[in-house]
Amino acid sequence: MKKWQEILKDSITSPTALNEYFNVNITSLEEVIATFPMRINPYYLKLIQKIGDPFWKQAVPDVAELHDPVCIEDPLAEENLSPVPHLVHKYPDRVLFLVSNQCAMYCRFCTRKRKVGTGKMVINQESIQAGLDYIRHHPQVREVLLSGGDPLLLPDSQIEFILRELRSIPSVKVIRIGTRVPCTLPMRITPELVAVLKKYHPLYINTHFNHPAEITPEASAACTLLADAGIPMGCQTVLLKGVNDNPETMRELLLKLLEIRVKPYYLFQTDLTRGTNHFRTPTATGIRIMRSLIGHISGLAVPTFALDGPGGKGKIPLTPDYILSRGDKLVFENYRGEICTYPESGDGI
Ligand SMILES: *Cc1c(COP(=O)(O)O)cnc(C)c1O
Ligand code: SF4
């Protein structure tokens, strides 16, 4: 069996190479990738059945990326919220620490597409040290979220170095890794990697699947290895036009995730990232999908539909409104649309 490093090396990074599999407009794709790089590894390439399908949309550049009239470079103001480069301190008790600029695939809708996979994102031993020092000197940080890029594209030894350093800081209670490799390059989840990860509990992994057909036997095996190592797994799905923006696809995805022991955590409204406007849906689409899920399927499978406030204002839940009126009685609709009432307690009034 090929090693994950070799599979990754065989990735398609130019339109000419892609043209061997699918008929594409080489010139216009070259224009796109001059700004936003492409990387489609052989594993994910196999998921693409035809031009324009949900896997194609996630992986293959689109000229629309260069003609985005609405969105901005850094919608979450991450650069302004970085006390040291590549460390975002937005919430009081947790930081986002970007430790890799590489991914197993460059998702076309990526929130950090302004820098991921490009020369603009320089991560080296110095930036890692600066991040670790910041965390060491800010004991209010009880949780560190490793992200990127994809932290699990680093060599095992570098991952272990970062985890060991973090664990040497007593104020850091929880480590969370954000990674898409269980979905985009599941062979990266090797027994050796898992043996490293399990030494640094409590360690959580939030992965990222967007479509039920991404849950292949390989992806399932990767998640089994992680779950068997006692790593609680969550999923951060992005709501994407033409990929998963309907109740049937979303429901199938969420239920399948539960079967591979991955708990749906967030469903994200698309950020206002330049080059991704063609993926955006109205917020009403997500709210309608949430209404089709809540009560109808296991609560374990229901994520929080969240909007990350532009300008770094933080995430808020977008929830269907079940409440019809408030007063002595709360009047609300249930998941079936039946009207219900609940008498308020008189206490404290
Ligand atoms: C999303 C995010 C977090 C984590 O938020 P949770 O609600 O705990 O998942 C932390 N820091 C930054 C900068 C974020 O964008
Ligand atoms: S894996 Fe995540 S960070 Fe990497 S390109 Fe995809 S969305 Fe962006």
Image (cartoon, helix red, strand yellow):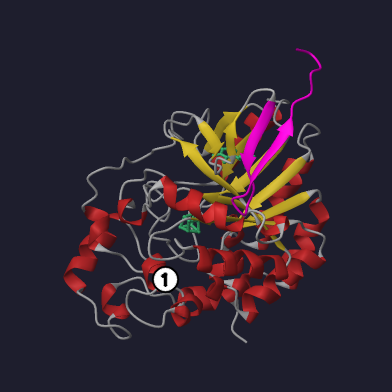
- Where 39 falls versus 282 (above or below)? below
Q: Residue furthest top?
A: 349
* Residue drawn at 42 percent across, 30 percent down: 311
Q: Quadrant of residue 160?
A: bottom right
* Residue drawn at 69 percent across, 28 percent down: 329
* Residue drawn at 28 percent across, 54 percent down: 35
Viewer-proximal residue among 71 and 334:
334
* Residue drawn at 30 percent across, 86 percent down: 20
- Seen in the image, is 175 located left or right of residue 10? right
Residue type at numbered disc 1: Pro
Q: Quadrant of residue 108?
A: bottom left
SS for dot 1 = helix
Is residue 331 found inside the magenta-colored segment of the image?
yes
- The location of residue 48, given as percent across then percent down, is 42, 79
Region in magenta: 329-349
Q: Residue furthest left?
A: 27
- Seen in the image, is 48 located left or right of residue 197? left
Q: Quadrant of residue 218?
A: bottom right
- The location of residue 320, given as percent across then percent down, is 55, 44
Numbered marks: total:
1
Say which quadrant the C terminus sits in: top right
- Where 42 falls versus 347 (above or below)? below
Badge 1 density bin: few <14, some 14–19, many ≥20, Cα 10 Å: many
The answer to whether residue 50 of the structure is visible from this angle is yes
Say which quadrant the N terminus sits in: bottom right
- Seen in the image, is 134 located left or right of residue 247? right
Is residue 45 found inside the magenta-colored segment of the image?
no
Residue under label 1: 54
